[in-house]
Image (cartoon, coloured by chain):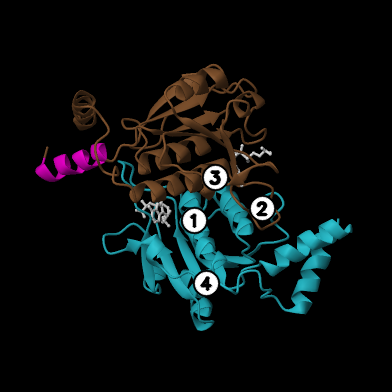
Chain colours: A brown, B cyan
Amino acid sequence: MTPERFAFFNHLIDHRQLDLTLVNDGIHKQQNLSAILRTCDAVGIARIHRVFDHRSARTFRGTAAGSHKWVDVVTHETSSEAILPLKEQGFQIVAAHLTESSVDFKAIDYTKPTAIVMGNEKFGVSDEALALCDHVVTIPMIGAVESLNVSVAAALILYEAMRQREHTEAFGVRQMGEEAAQKLLFEVTQP
Amino acid sequence: MTPERFAFFNHLIDHRQLDLTLVNDGIHKQQNLSAILRTCDAVGIARIHRVFDHRSARTFRGTAAGSHKWVDVVTHETSSEAILPLKEQGFQIVAAHLTESSVDFKAIDYTKPTAIVMGNEKFGVSDEALALCDHVVTIPMIGAVESLNVSVAAALILYEAMRQREHTEAFGVRQMGEEAAQKLLFEVTQP
Ligand SMILES: C[S@@+](CC[C@H](N)C(=O)[O-])C[C@H]1O[C@@H](n2cnc3c(N)ncnc32)[C@H](O)[C@@H]1O
Ligand SMILES: C[S@@+](CC[C@H](N)C(=O)[O-])C[C@H]1O[C@@H](n2cnc3c(N)ncnc32)[C@H](O)[C@@H]1O
């Protein structure tokens, strides 16, 4: 590995956001999943959670080009199975959901450990997931359409999180343990 | 029409951004086009431009649910045909493009009349379009993937534009002439 490439990977590892994650609560279109994975990688997310969508029962195939070594996707049977362990680890749970009682997505403090819950293309976030959320946020829309594409909505929230995190002292300070970092470095540099 | 609905439509018309537009420079996946149209509607854009993609030669079919009456899509044969009239009308032309010499997308003043140029899924923004641009912007990415999905990238830039515009005095002041507003109101209230 060239020194440039080594420096590049170290930079990536220093900026991995172990305390930021996404819970895909039943999103099933392949193109949306792939767009979301690319965005997660772009903001430094190491692992996301996926609730198996029983309504459409599709299987998850493939990954976004280049991101599969970097972003882990953990599959769960139910929303609770995905969300409860995150709550125990101290993550605030923020659902992106279109409802009257939600707050502007920019009003949340994303510098705290945060899991963003995104809903199914047609049915939105499940009631089971909503019951476990600390906050429900909406991205303001001034037009006539009812909702944004789910990968677009996820990106707007994740980049808002990054915008806030960039201004903290912890930004760029390695969160990953030495062993995990070495393991990742080894994996990504394998052909 | 109920008074609530009338007030809703008037609010939309007051927030239409006639001096903000998007030039789709050869994007051809239907799902991306549809996601972009929804986002354009959500930030109040009235009209976007589309350069026919000769490389893939697909025709544009359909529109995003609910947005077709609100967002006009004007098709052009070449990038110049789309961009030159906008330049003449005083729009600054901002290409979203991944290159070393580009600037952070947040560094641009989007309160000026602005057209955002988005590129093809595979080939990016065309050389013809790049030659006509005033600025080239990139959305920072700290991971390993090479680019974001095009509809995700468009949304991040358009919502940054809205973020800036929301803080100006002109925000919410009707830009549309009375006649155009009445015509639109008539159209959208037709079944
Ligand atoms: C296409 S939307 C689902 C719409 C569904 N009909 C509903 O009312 O929930 C898919 C997901 O994208 C996210 N989403 C889309 N637009 C949003 C917005 N403006 N604010 C917050 N989340 C949004 C939510 O997570 C939603 O569950
Ligand atoms: C999938 S990308 C095209 C990638 C293409 N291989 C290239 O290098 O240009 C499609 C379009 O999305 C936009 N885009 C994607 N990621 C971007 C980023 N990080 N910054 C700016 N624009 C981006 C650009 O308009 C680009 O032309």
Q: Nearer the viewer, mark 1 or mark 3?
A: 3
Residue type, numbered disc 4: Ala
| Residue at image point 72% right, 52% down | B66
On residue A153, which mark appears? Answer: 3
Query: Quadrant location of the N terminus of chain B?
Result: bottom right
How far apart in space, not on screen, are marks 2 and 1 (Cα)?
17 Å
Q: Is mark 1 within 8 Å of ligand 2?
A: yes
Q: Return the residue at label 2.
A: B63
Residue B154 drawn at (x, y percent):
49, 56
Q: Nearer the viewer, mark 4 or mark 1?
A: 1
Q: Nearer the viewer, residue A45 or B182?
A: A45
Does label 4 or label 2 sit earlier along the sequence? 2
Residue B94 is left or right of residue A138, and the answer is: left
Name which quarter of the figure residue B10 lies in: bottom right
- Count residues near mark 1 (Cα–Cα under 10 Å), then give few for <14, some for 14-19, many for 20+: many
- Count residues near mark 4 (Cα–Cα under 10 Å), then give few for <14, some for 14-19, many for 20+: many
Q: Are marks 2 and 1 in contact (CB under 8 Å)?
A: no
Name which quarter of the figure residue A42 lies in: top left
Q: Nearer the viewer, mark 2 or mark 3?
A: 3
- Count residues near mark 3 (Cα–Cα under 10 Å), then give few for <14, some for 14-19, many for 20+: many
Query: Quadrant location of the C terminus of chain B?
Result: bottom right
Does label 4 or label 1 sit earlier along the sequence? 4
Relative to B2, residue A6 above or below: above
| Residue at image point 38% right, 55% down | B139
Would you say residue B43 sits in the magenta stretch? Answer: no
Residue A123 is left or right of residue A35, and the answer is: right
Dots 4 and 2 on the same chain: yes
Span colored in magenta: A2-14
